[in-house]
Image (cartoon, helix red, strand yellow):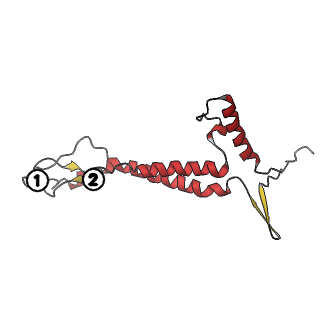
Amino acid sequence: MAHGDIPIIPVVGEEVYIENHTVRYGLVRFAKDPQRLFNYMRSASAEWIALQPKAPFLVTVAQIAGLEDKWGEIGHANKPYLTYNPDPKAPGKPERAQPPVAAGGLITEAGLAAEDMKNTTGIFDASLGQRSNEVSGAAIKARQKEGNLALSSISIT
């Protein structure tokens, strides 16, 4: 190889021959949909959690009469206090509405999508060096070998 040449090494991936047509795909092709689902569920969960401190206040018109500008800023300004007008028809102070409860289904679905990605690619936690439930050395080696076989099933030619 001459000085300055950049070697190009093709990595084809899997090849499937259908009639007279060759279809090629790599490791991530079938993991795209679980990844999209994972991204969506994590984004929806983050949005849900971010909205909890912005639960609206339940007030009467009389309680905020003349203070509408101050009350209108509470969603984006960190005020140390809020004043209100006592309303004899609604005794007590304005109360924040109950914030939405975290949706456990979003977190569960994100976890399932992450498992789908592992199952689709054949790359599991143990093959990435993370501990799993195996305790014997033989079981750990078997799990690592399983991950290595999954990676080697993608032809690199």
| Front residue (pair 147, 66) | 147
Residue 16: percent from the left, percent from the top?
78, 62
Q: Check disc 1 and report the residue beneath it.
A: 90
**Residue 42 visible in this rendered orientation of the protein:** no
Does residue 107 appear in the picture of this structure? Answer: yes
Q: Residue furthest left?
A: 88
What residue is shown at x 56% (from left), y 48% (from top)?
A: 114
Tell me if residue 62 comes above or below residue 149 in the rendering.
below
Residue type (three-letter) at the residue carrying disc 2: Pro
Residue 56's disc number: 2
Q: Position of residue 105 (x, y in %)?
A: 43, 52
Query: Amino acid under label 1?
Result: Ala
State the residue in front, 70 or 39. Answer: 39
Earlier sequence position, callout 1 versus callout 2? 2
Q: Nearer the viewer, residue 114 or 60?
A: 114
Numbered marks: total: 2
